[in-house]
Image: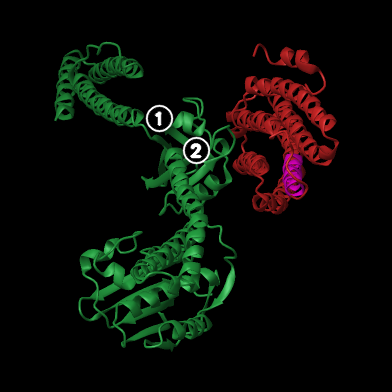
Amino acid sequence: MLKKEDYQHHISATFNTELESLRNQMLSMGGAVEQQLTSAISALLQMDTGEAQAIIDRDAEINQMEMSIDDACATIIARRQPTASDLRLVIAIIKVNTDLERIGDEAAKIAQQTIRMSDDGISPSNFAEVRQIGELVGSMLHRALDAFARLEVEQAVEVVRGDEEVDRQYGSAMRSLATFMLEDSRKIGVILNEMWALRSLERIGDHATNIAEHLVYLVKGADVRHGGLEGLHEHAPKG
Amino acid sequence: MSGLKAGLKIALLVLGAAMLGWIYGYTATAVMITLSAVICFWLYEIDKVQRWLSDPEQDVPDTSGIWSDLLALIYFHQRKSDQVQAQLQSTIEYMQSSLAVIRDGVVMVGEDGIIAWFNRSAEPLLGLRYPEDTGQRLTNLVRDPEFADYFLAQDYSEPLQFEVTGGSEKVFLRVEITHFGEGDRVLFIRDVSDSVRMEKMRSDFVANVSHELRTPLTVITGYLGTIEANVEDLPQRYRRPLEQMGQQAHRMESVLHDLLWLSKIESGQSARTDETVDIGGLLQELRDELGDAYPKATLLLELSSKRSVIGSYQQLYSAVSNLVINAIKYSGENSAVTVSWFEEHGKSKLNVSDAGIGIDAVHLPRLTERFYRVDDSRNSATGGTGLGLAIVKHVAAAHGARLLIESQIGEGSTFSLIFSSGG
């Protein structure tokens, strides 16, 4: 099993620092993405279009971070030819990087919906579902990144399990919004906007799950992406 | 000394052996056998010492002569360093246990940003877990960009207040960081969500009350205006009360206006804050406007700087006009007020000076508080709202400027706005 200290085992001190700084870079991008998500949800709930525009503008910074991390990964592969756990770390970071960037995109989409909603009118649902699912997804992302910082498989398994709850709540939110549409067909446009925002949140949950699965791959060396929860339990005992 | 003694002993032994050997005719052999015996004995003693040193917990071995002296010295030093270490350890534990019970979160971080230690209170605040998280990089676990930027910039002159991302409730933390030792840092973290909420509630309340009061007041002043226009229809004895009602209603309106304006500046919602404001032009405009309202007052402009300020024109205008109107009011009808805009030590300064009655030094610290009055009796004569200087202070803060007040009783006052960076 991989431990944090394993990154300090190289004879080359610069290689150690390179790997460590790659991880730090990824986690600080994670922090930026987390903030984007939190702000996007609160901007939507408070219909704060100024904040929403700021989120859309900040997405460029996230994209910039993604490119610089990708670049660093390519450099390490080219110059160090990493093997075993080092290689897994680099691969995992490349993948997490993509997922984080997508989460950033989805947050920007939510912000866009916020601006659109302020033009089209407020949904009659009071955004109870957005609040609930948003909280759930936010905590999933937070725990997935925490698990990455601590190299903790148990927490990653928790995150994967959390996604089932998100899917369940997403399904029931869709049904309740459909009821609103049936009640008042003039509100369909408005409610569709909210559905798009929910859809983005659900996607963010999926990306957070991916991040957790990349961590299991990094620590255990096993690909648990398409094995379902049973496959996960094989590699991560109890939890 | 003991080396000399041991040498003497060996010399005597060798001498005795040599004499004995000389009697029997084998001097050299006797000396050699004796020396070999001495070396063997010493080797045996060295072995004992070495075995004891490899595990000092066991009993001190019995040795003789120089070896026992040596062992006693080693033993003595070892005991002493043990004691010092125990003392140090207990001091560290004492310090840590005192920090551990503090209600604020305390985190100690090494030069490289690695967590060295943190107390129980820091765990829920930052989402850390003891002891697994020691040895982790702090910014990997507390990832809020605001915090990370502040932490990495290493400029801790001002504490940081930031909102924690994630979680259902809004949580605000206040972090103070201090350097100690060689590049080590200690963080004090406090949950300030309650005070942030209270502060927000307070300013929301003021804004809402002012807003709610405005509508009824508009109705009252409207009717008062209508009645005053037809004042001839009324008996003489009602005219004076009506006139006073009108005056006070206007005063209330301007208080509400200032309160709303103040809470707008405070919440940072006012229009644009990135305009390039030409202070010279602003002062000319102000002079033109005040010329109508205070025809007797003289306003002297001294514009030696051409610098402009980045900020909001509306806010700066209201701040400067508050200062100038105050100066005119408190310096008597016909006196002059001087406004100068100049550069000093690389900073831009705006001075508003009058030759009026001046302010007692005891009032200066509280002068910018809302509704603070130097003298109650003067209140009705000048008709101010009591919010002017509070507005000036907030506008200054929003523009990174400082408000400095100098005053001499009977000689006049100077209010200065000092902008740290010209535009």
- What colour has chain A? red
Give the image location of residue B251, x and y in percent: 40, 65
Q: What is the spatial separation of the Cα atoms under label 1 and label 2, in whole angstroms? A: 15 Å
Asked whether, in this view, residue A146 is left or right of residue A52, the answer is: left
Q: Colour of chain B?
A: green
Q: Which residue is mark 2?
A: B114
Q: Chain of mark 1?
A: B
Element under label 1?
A: loop
Q: Is residue A100 magenta?
A: no
In reply to whether residue A115 is colored magenta, the answer given is: yes
The subunit carrying tag 2 is B
Q: Earlier in the sequence, mark 1 or mark 2?
A: 2
Query: Considering depth in this image, is B165 or B280 the residue closer to the camera?
Result: B280
In the picture shown, does residue B193 fall above or below B341?
above
Start and end of the magenta stretch?
A101-118
Residue labelled with disc 1:
B119
